[in-house]
Amino acid sequence: MGPIIDVDLDAIVHNYLAFADAVQVPVLSVVKADAYGHGALPVARAVTQAGCGWLGVVDISEALALRAGGVTDARILTWMHSPATDWAMAFDADIDIAVSTIEQLSLVERAATKFCGKGTRAPRVHLKLDTGLGRNGATAKTWRALIAQAAEADRAGVLRVCGLMSHLSGTGAAEDLQQGKQFAAARELAQEAGLHIEHAHIAATAGAMKYPQMRHDLVRLGISLYGLAPEESGAADALKLRPALRLRAPIRRFDNRWAVAVGEGDGLPPLVSALPPLVDSQGTYWKIDRMGPLHLYLSPMGDVPVDESAATAAPARELVVIGHDRNQDGELVGADADDWARAGGTINYEITTRLTRRILRDYGGHTAAEGTNIAWPPMEESEQRSKRSITAPLREAVIDLELLQRRLTRLTQRSLAVGAQRRSAEFGVDVSSDAYGHGLDQILPYVRSSGLPIVARTRTDMDALERRGVTGHYFPDAPSATRGVYGLDPREPLPPTLSLVSELVSVKRVSAGQRVSYGYEWTASKSTTLGLVPLGYADALPRSAFGKAQVTVAGWPAPIVGRIAMDQVVVDLGDRECWPGMRVQVWGSAGNDLSLSQWATWTGWSPEALCANLGSRVERRYRGRQVMVEVK
């Protein structure tokens, strides 16, 4: 048995009902990013069965997955879209769409005109306004034009403009209240234009609790749905929240060390300060000595008998990695998501959301593996994306199979050169953590064809090989050379075989003084162009990259500005001419690309952990020769 995440759906329902009772207006439960790591479909089913009529996700793809899973009665709102989106997919699935610019509204309107020609109802639209957060949403200069165009489409019966939304920065009361005033003014503009706004919403968990006047017709319940409170909001005590997630993992012993097989590659952040002692299933306390990409190395705070069971497939002890228990005196012990956030220099949102979907979730015994906006020229898109319906912004891990195969061939030749007796696991290929984000099922045939030994560093990874009928070598301390074929050996720096790419989904010109993202930790010193990239810490970019990291847009460096959020990040494009749909390279292997090792330096996460911990919304695309050659 490997690591398990226990999800308490009863706690989630309790949190929803407590919040709904406190705010006394309809609640939208946010289940984006796989419900902050808890499992979108089980959570959505639980809250809708408890009476929740609204769900929120980032993109249409997430909404379609819920519909396919049987969530058919609730309204589902999406708010981030590629310029190449197939809007009809959303219309067919009865999904509410938030639009953020005049140009985006025009695209939706054109698609809706064709759709309505079939005799169907007009699609529902929410206008997304930027009242000061500086990210997605129409800037104040464009509100009148956006609302006028929306009202005309509404009168024509092409669209049903039913919502108005924005997002608070959470910087402080003065800033939040100013945003609230701007939002109220925008609602008046909509009413003057003849729009009947049924669902105005600006407040999420903390804002709804602090500012009753901002509850309007709908409030969004995010982190507190899962029993955790926004930073310094006081919501946990006020609502008597119940945390819904616990991570536990068996304790094993190898090479005279104790360890559990979870680490950075599974989503745990590098530690910058000490955690409280963790507790195992037999009441023994443990401290963390070191965190690796795949393991937490531990020391017991007391005597632990060393027996053979610690090295078997069914160890006797299980460590509660995330979660509180009560000791014999009734005191809370262990480390919850807030403790991990403090020790990792981050927030509780990132702790649960980054936990990889490779860790099984258990739901009570049922396990599931489961300014002036710039106009939009035609989108730059890959050949693959142009051949299918696009329902999500571009988030792609591009894997170079030809480069991988060349490196496998060289490694095979090197191992043969030193003699057959040396062809041990040290000359093998480490395929742990889904081949470090490359995709085990895609990579394994190439490794098997090479004839090289196949290495796995955890029992969970060994189980994955056994299920595929493959013999592997269990090697927890496999040397970095076994990961060299991916470009992940620091002793032999090579370009990575996995590149990370995205696109701009929004571009806007802003004036000096524009503040960006939560806490307003970045302010534009002069007029500039800002771009929104649909990647956040749920996908690939740890929050620790803020203030240091860059991406490249059309080969030019663009620094990240403002805090990295769960689903998006803002970049400063300067005075360059840019537009939505332009390709964004996070890291890669071409001449102007930023390197994976640079990202490791900026974030404090190891290169192998950055690849292994890519989120489930990041699609894998394979390029290069796919002909495998048997090595003899």
Image (tube, grey):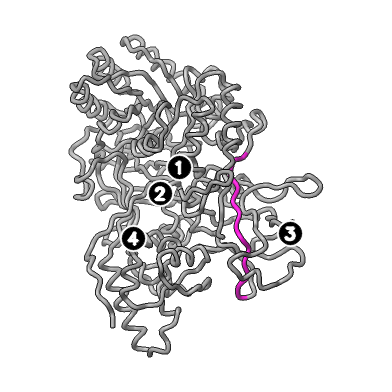
> Does the magenta segment cover residue 250?
yes
Quadrant of the snapshot with the C terminus: bottom left
Q: Position of residue 501 (x, y in %)?
A: 31, 51
Numbered circle sitting on residue 616: 2
Q: Considering only vertical position in the picture, is 329 above or below 476?
A: above
Residue placed under numbered mark 3 in the picture: 284
**Residue at image location 23% in from the left, 63% down from the top:** 624
Name which quarter of the figure residue 567 lies in: top left
**Residue at image location 61% in from the left, 54% down from the top:** 248
Most distant residue in the right direction: 329
Secondary structure at badge 4 equals strand
Numbered circle sitting on residue 48: none
**Amino acid type, callout 1:** Asp
Residue placed under numbered mark 4 in the picture: 498
Q: Position of residue 401 (x, y in %)?
A: 28, 65
**Amino acid type, callout 3:** Thr
Secondary structure at badge 2 equals loop
Q: Nearer the viewer, mark 1 or mark 4?
A: 1
Q: Tell me the chief SS of the magenta region.
A: strand
Secondary structure at badge 3 equals loop
Question: Which one is in front, 329 or 172?
Answer: 329
**Amino acid type, callout 4:** Leu
Q: Considering only vertical position in the picture, is 622 above or below 116?
A: below
Q: Considering only vertical position in the picture, is 197 above or below 421?
A: above
Quick one: label 3 or label 2, which is nearer the N terminus?
3
Mark 3 touching mark 2, by CB under 8 A? Answer: no
Numbered circle sitting on residue 34: 1
Q: CA distance from mark 4 to mark 2?
A: 15 Å
**Amino acid type, callout 2:** Ser
Mark 2 touching mark 1, by CB under 8 A? Answer: yes
Quick one: label 3 or label 4, which is nearer the N terminus?
3
Question: For mark 3, does the 10 Å Cα neighbourhood hold few (<14), some (14 to 19), or many (20 or more) residues?
Answer: some
